[in-house]
Image (tube, helix red, strand yellow):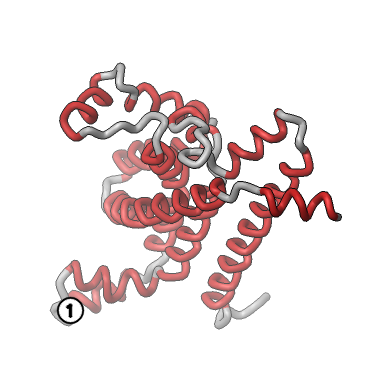
Amino acid sequence: MENINDIIKSLDWSPLFISIKTGIVATVICFFLGIFAARKVIQMPAGKKAVIDGILTLPMVLPPTVAGFFLLLLFSRRRPFGIFLYENFDLKVVQTWLGCIIAASVIAFPLMYRNARAAFEQIDVNLVYAGRTLGMTESKIFWKVVMPTAGPGIASGTILTFARALGEYGATSMLAGNIPGKTGTISQKIAMVIQDGDYLTAGIWVAIVMVIALAAIILMNLISGKRMKNVKRW
């Protein structure tokens, strides 16, 4: 026990702070992009919807290292787009915290998008028609009718997105690297200490991640429970 206490006291907490900051920023980005994409996709014709939906969902089914490979090709300073960003905006993505955010956002985005789309598709269209009958603009209908009705689904997607962004490893490692105090996240820290044979420290970090993940799942279940409280059980 004393050994565990000593390890906890000597821990460098920067991976936790970096992971939380990355998760929060990535979640905010995915929240707005996911809602926007979901709103647009459900209005598309069936054929176009199938193609666009497949593209937007692809990062969820690809191995994270594959997504990281494509991101590295895109943002590398040896590639046209990476050179353009650096020369015109002084933006460097590879091996920076910005790379952590982009990698986490790309991997977590499908969770936000699909939850938002599912929530929108379950809305009673008569509510929208009623809003139009009352003379409400499409924008006002969306924010005053659609979003509140889809709220529990949106909230669940947001929580899952944060949890996924918090624990992202593969794409982050390839794009942002593992620079202690800069891009080193919890997942990267766990992999590094295991390689060093320090299973005790790895276990502590695993426990921290599990507590955060469990809290996210419980919160999501509580939100879903409020949504279903008036539904008759069979």
Classify the position of the C terminus by image quarter.
Answer: bottom right
Q: Which residue ends up furthest to the right in the rendered image?
A: 1
**Nearer to me, 23 or 138:** 23
Number of labelled discs?
1
Give percent across and percent down for residue 126. Answer: 31, 74
Apparent side of residue 182 relative to residue 46 in the rendered image (left or right): right
**Nearer to me, 213 or 191:** 191
Q: Is residue 192 above or below residue 69?
A: below
Point 58% across, 74% down: residue: 225
Give percent across and percent down for residue 85. Answer: 22, 30
Q: Is residue 159 above or below residue 144?
A: above
Point 16% across, 30% down: residue: 88
Give percent across and percent down for residue 124. Answer: 37, 71
Q: Which residue ends up furthest to the top in the rendered image?
A: 78
Can see residue 12?
A: yes
Point 64% across, 52% down: residue: 209
Classify the position of the N terminus by image quarter.
Answer: bottom right
Give percent across and percent down for residue 177. Answer: 48, 30
Can see residue 54?
A: no
Q: Which residue is mark 1?
A: 133
Question: Which quadrant holds residue 132?
Answer: bottom left
Q: Identify which amino acid the numbered label 1 is placed on.
A: Thr
Label 1 secondary element: helix
Apparent side of residue 83 relative to residue 59 in the rendered image (left or right): left
